[in-house]
Amino acid sequence: MPAHFFVTGTDTDVGKTLISEGLIHAANMQGLSTAALKPVAAGCESTPDGLRNEDALILQKAINTPLSYEQINPVALAAPMAPHIAAAQEGRNLRASQLAGFCRGVLMQRTDIVIIEGAGGWRVPLNTRETLADVAKILSLPVIMVVGMRLGCLNHAYLTAEAIRRDGLVLAGWVSNHIDPDMPAYAESLADLEQGLGAPCLGHIPFLSNPQGIHIKNDLDIGKILPPEFFYK
């Protein structure tokens, strides 16, 4: 039975791609087949092959299932801003059903683990009625939440976890990512989250000056979210 997850963050720039990449490398290390998507990405650079997003390219390099760039990032937007605003500037409309359809094409493949990385936080708008959370809802995906450890993260983490559950989805696990080395009461905040989130902690990522997913694969305990049979293939 494949394992599919949606990765969200407590805010933008909290390390969703880093954690997604790390989870993929951890799964690769277990001999599992891996795939990943970033269904919509804003902040893409123009290349001879078309618009390309750095985060999507990182995911493409990490996975061991061959996928084209367009499969990983079907909607690439140039401007580095909220996706619905970037899309409007290009005369495009974003719909949750369309993005979910793109995802289904990859989810139907016989891949052990598929990571779908969101953009920004849980409630990032796609249009006037839908948010990116609706994609996860349509696909009924369990969610992995990345908590950017900085001042204010407790409020953001608890609100995000509450919203995920109110949307009827399972918070499969969470990861703390120490993005502010000067964060006050770091240890106390971690202890608070471990007690209060009510979901497995998959790992604590220390502050890294040059973070890369390959370097944190041993810091992530994917055994907490994967069925036991995955480890006896």
Image (cartoon, grey):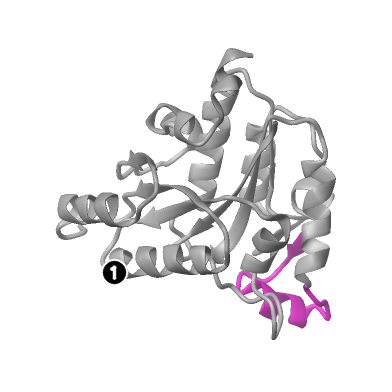
Against 95, is 117 above or below? above
Query: Which quarter of the rendering shows the C terminus?
Result: top right
User: Mark 1 = which residue?
Assistant: 152
Q: From the top left corner, tell me how far across and down residue 162 is, in percent.
A: 43, 67
Residue 96, image quadrant: bottom right
Q: From the top left corner, tell me how far across and down residue 185 is, in percent.
A: 15, 57
Q: From the top left corner, tell me how far across and down residue 71 is, in percent.
A: 81, 47
The kind of residue tagged 1 is: Gly
Question: Which type of secondary structure does the marked residue at label 1 adopt?
Answer: loop
Q: In this picture, which residue range is highlighted in magenta?
A: 75-94
Of residues 211 and 132, the one nearer the viewer is 132
The answer, for residue 70, to whether it is visible in the render is no
Against 130, is 34 above or below? above
Query: Which quarter of the rendering shows the N terminus?
Result: top right
Q: From the top left corner, tell me how far across and down residue 187 is, in percent.
A: 17, 49
Outermost bottom residue:
128
- Tell me the residue at 78%/61% (across/down): 99
Residue 60 included in the magenta stretch of the image: no
Residue 3, image quadrant: top right
The answer, for residue 138, to whether it is visible in the render is yes
Against 191, is 78 above or below? below
Against 81, is 187 above or below? above
- Tell me the residue at 64%/23% (across/down): 32
CA neighbours of label 1 inside 10 A, class few (<14), some (14 to 19), many (20+) = few
